[in-house]
Image (cartoon, rainbow, N blue to C red):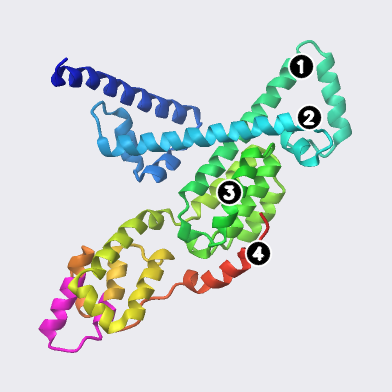
């Protein structure tokens, strides 16, 4: 078989695989199994780009690979959650005396009026078809909790390391195991609260002013639907646009350091230049233009003729990939901007280092 023949045989299979992948994503979106916003955040798409990708029949190597990787990770998390749930159920059967195992194997929390609930259950079971209705309700609850766990695990994977306390690195594995093993919405509540405690202030678009009220309301919730709404509220308050820009800012910053302009900035203010990197990692910049302002401000302390200073500023902007505007040319010398998130970083890290798993 010639190389060309092999390529012709491979092409239809690749095309079919892409078609099936898009079909699976579209079906999951239609059923509500996945959130379009989650897909967009995971692969760096906008919603219009996602819609275009789903409808086009031609290959798109950039998006095809990213969506395929995201699907693989999502499926792995789902399998992990299901496996943990089955292991928890088996443990409760073999060891009924274990409080943790029994709790993990239960469905959603029972109503506060336990006697009335038991009486109602007995009544339903004595009615023809009652067992089927009860079993169906239990299965629906378990499915809702399973999806809730997947949403929480997925949210955590999208949060950058610089948006959480350094202590999270040693806590994360245990947190993930407990989340996978959670048997009801109440257990998921505790895992959501645990994650929120480790988020730094810089993870949010503004001060997490609703935090206390959000926590109090979450502790009163015992249905997967209510907890999912609280999870979305937390998610919507986060700095997703700046999370997405972080890798570009880091890349351009590193490029600046290797340029001649970067060498000059090191001589003019190494500490202030390092503070620019700290501001990047605490999501203090909305984009490259903001970072350019702080770098230009460091260059404002350079001595020499106006033409030489302009040349330095032009070199900085060229390295960062931003135009040198009149506003940047007139920018006076000053220190790099500070962020509340940077100020809170050390104290938050110290407080959370001793937090329990």
Task: Place residue 165 in its image quadrant.
Answer: bottom right
**Residue denoted by label 3:** 173
Which comes before the other along the chain, label 3 or label 2? Answer: 2
For residue 7, side relative to residue 193 (left or right): left
Residue drawn at x 14%, y 20% is 4
Asked if the residues shown at circle 1 and circle 4 are in contact, with their CB atoms under 8 angstroms apart, the answer is no
Q: Which is more N-terminal, label 4 or label 3?
A: 3
Q: Residue furthest front?
A: 1
Q: Secondary structure at mark 2?
A: helix
In the picture of the structure, the residue carrying the numbered disc 4 is 354
Q: Position of residue 292 (x, y in %)?
A: 27, 70
Residue 181 image position (x, y, % from top left): 65, 38
Question: What separation in Å lies between label 3 and label 2 (alpha carbons)?
Answer: 26 Å
Q: Which residue is mark 2?
A: 94
- Mark 2 or mark 4, earlier in chain: 2
Mark pair 3, 4: CA separation: 16 Å
Residue located at (59% from left, 45% from top): 176
Q: Picture quarter containing residue 131?
A: top right
Q: Is residue 331 visible?
A: no
What residue is disc 1 on?
131
């Amino acid at each position: 078989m010639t190389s060309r023949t092999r390529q012709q045989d491979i092409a239809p299979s690749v095309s079919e695989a892409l078609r099936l992948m898009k079909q699976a994503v579209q079906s999951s979106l239609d059923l509500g199994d996945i959130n379009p916003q989650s897909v967009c955040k995971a692969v760096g798409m906008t919603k219009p780009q996602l819609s275009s990708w789903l409808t086009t029949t031609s290959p798109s190597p950039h998006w095809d690979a990213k969506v395929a990787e995201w699907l693989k990770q999502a499926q792995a998390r789902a399998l992990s959650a299901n496996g943990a749930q089955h292991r928890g159920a088996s443990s409760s059967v073999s060891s009924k005396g274990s409080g943790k195992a029994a709790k993990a194997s239960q469905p959603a929390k029972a109503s506060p009026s336990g006697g009335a609930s038991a009486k109602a259950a007995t009544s339903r079971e004595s009615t023809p078809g009652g067992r089927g209705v009860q079993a169906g309700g239990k299965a629906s609850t378990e499915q809702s909790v399973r999806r809730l766990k997947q949403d929480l695990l997925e949210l955590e994977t999208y949060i950058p390391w610089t948006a959480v306390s350094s202590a999270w690195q040693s806590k994360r594995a245990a947190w993930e195991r407990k989340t996978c093993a959670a048997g009801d919405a109440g257990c998921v509540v505790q895992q959501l609260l645990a994650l929120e405690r480790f988020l730094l202030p810089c993870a949010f678009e503004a001060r997490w002013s609703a935090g206390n009220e959000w926590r109090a309301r979450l502790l009163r919730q015992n249905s997967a639907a209510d907890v999912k709404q609280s999870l979305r509220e937390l998610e919507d308050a986060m700095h997703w646009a700046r999370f997405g820009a972080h890798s570009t800012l880091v890349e351009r910053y590193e490029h600046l350091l290797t340029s001649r302009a970067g060498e000059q900035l090191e001589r003019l203010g190494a500490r202030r230049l390092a503070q620019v990197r700290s501001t990047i990692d605490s999501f203090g910049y909305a984009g490259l233009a903001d970072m350019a302002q702080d770098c230009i401000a460091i260059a404002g302390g350079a001595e020499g003729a106006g033409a030489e200073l302009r040349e330095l500023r032009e070199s900085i902007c060229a390295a960062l990939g931003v135009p040198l505007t009149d506003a940047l040319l007139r920018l006076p010398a000053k220190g790099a901007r500070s962020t509340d998130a940077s100020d809170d970083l050390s104290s938050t890290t110290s407080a959370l280092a001793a937090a329990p798993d």
